[in-house]
Image: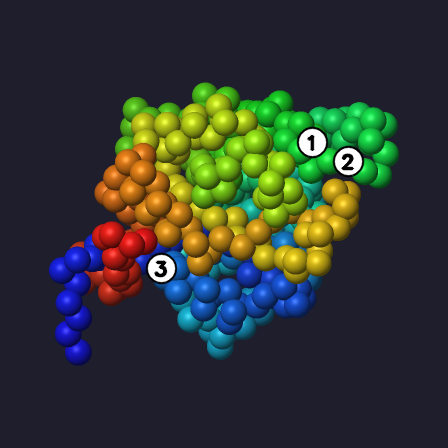
Amino acid sequence: MRLDASQNFLLPGVIDDQVHFREPGLTLKGDIATESRAAVAGGVTSFMDMPNTTPKATTLEILEEKYRIASEKSLANYSFFLGAANDNLQEIKMADPSRICGLKVFMGASTGNMLVDNPDTLEAIFSSSPLLIAVHAEEEPIVQRNLRFYQEKYGDDIPVAAHPLIRSEEACFVSSEKAVRLAQKHNARLHLLHLSTEKELELLRNDIPLTEKRITGEVCVHHLWFDDRDYAELGARIKWNPAIKTSRDREGLLQGLLNGKIDIIATDHAPHLLSEKANPYMSCPSGGPLVQHALVAMMGFYHLGKISVESIVEKMCHGPATLYRIPDRGFIRKGFKADLVRVDKDNP
C-alpha cells in the first residue's frame, strides 16, 4: 500500500516516559489495552509506566507481572519503572537496567502514596541504584504546612485555586534541590520529572549535550499549556501534582525547553473517573488523561509560532531515546524500528 504524505510531516513515534496506565488494580479508570490504544491514536508508540498501581510495583516479582500483562495487551512498545520504597533497597540493587527503564522515587506524596522520606534510605538509593532515578520532587513537610493553613482558613471547602499555593514553588524547589545534591554527591543519574516552576531551571544545565548530562529534566504538556488563571474555568480538571502554577512559570518552562535546559516533553497521563474529579478538593484525585492529545497540543504550539517541529521531535522522540538509552527507536534512521507518525501540516 502507498500513502500520499506530501502534505504531511513524517515523525518518529513519540516516546512518553511518564504514564499511569492503571493496571493492575485500578482498571476502572483504564488499563494497558485502552491506554496504549489511546497512545497509538495520538502518535505515542512507546510508553514508560509508573509503579503506583495496586499492588505497588516495588518488587521485581510484581514488576514482572506488569510486563506479562503488557505482552498480552499493549498496542505500543513499553517499559515499566520499579518503585522505590523505604524498605526495598535489595530489590532496587537487583534491577536490570537493560530491561527496566528506571527507578521512580516519590520524594513528595501523590496519588497512590509511595512517599520515600527516610534520609538514610534516600542516601542508599542514590549511592547504589543501578537504574536511572526519576523523581517526583515536592517537599512533603512544606506541602503539609501549607495544607494546614488552608484547612484552617477554609475548613473542608478548600478552593482548587489554592492547589498551587499548597503544592507551592518552595515545596518543588526545595525537594528538587535536595535530589540534585544527592545525585551530585553520589554521581547518580537523576531525572527530574514534571517540572512546574521556572525556579527549578536553576538546577539544570544547557552547556553540555544530553549524552553527557547526569542530571536531566522534563516538562509535561499541561504545565506548558495552562496557568493558575485557568482554575477559575476548569477547576479540578486541571488539578495535577505538581500543581499548575503561574503564567511566569508556564512561560519560563517553555523557554527552558527551547534553550536546552529541559530535555523531554512528557504527559504524566493519569486518567480518573469524571465522578472522582467532581469531588471536593481533599478527596479529588490529581491527574488527567493526556497521552492521546500531547503531540496534537505541541503541534498547536507549532502553529502558534512558539516552537519548531524539529524541537518537538527533539524533545518527544530523540531526547527520550537518548536519555533512556533506547538503541533502535526515537529516530528515523536506517536499521531503526519503523515507529512512524504522519501528521497533517495544516490540521493537527
Closer-to-camera residue (73/214): 73
Q: How is the image coloured?
A: rainbow
Q: Kindly identify the residue that appears in the image at 48 percent across and 23 percent down.
A: 248
Residue at image position (60%, 40%) is: 233
Tell me, yes or no, whether the two marked residues, 3 and 2, touch with CB atoms within 8 Å.
no
The image quarter containing residue 282 is top right
Q: Give the side of residue 73 with respect to residue 141, left or right.
A: left
Say which quarter of the image contains residue 143.
top right
Kindly state the secondary structure of the residue where label 1 is placed.
helix
**Closer to the N terminus: mark 3 or mark 2?**
3
Measure how far apart labels 3 and 2 are at the Cα level: 38 Å
Q: SS class of the residue under badge 3?
A: loop
Are circles 3 and 1 on residues that touch, CB within 8 Å?
Answer: no
Contact (Cβ within 8 Å) of mark 1 with mark 2: yes
Which residue is at a point 54% across and 55% down the rendered structure image? 289
Report, in whole angstroms, how far the alpha carbon at label 1 lies from the one at label 2: 7 Å
Label 1: how many residues lie within 10 Å, few (<14), some (14-19) or many (20+)? some
> In this figure, which residue is indicated by the disc labeled 2?
158
Q: Is 269 positioned to the left or the right of 335 in the image?
A: right
Q: Is residue 183 visible?
A: no
The kind of residue tagged 3 is Gly
**Can you say whether 74 is above or below 311 in the image?**
below
Q: Quadrant of the N terminus?
A: bottom left
Q: Which residue is mark 3?
A: 43
Q: Where residue 188 sits in the image (x, y, percent)? A: 47, 36
* Disc assigned to residue 162: 1
Q: How far from the left and from the top, in percent, is residue 53?
A: 64, 59
The amino acid on which the numbered mark 2 sits, given as a three-letter code, is Ile
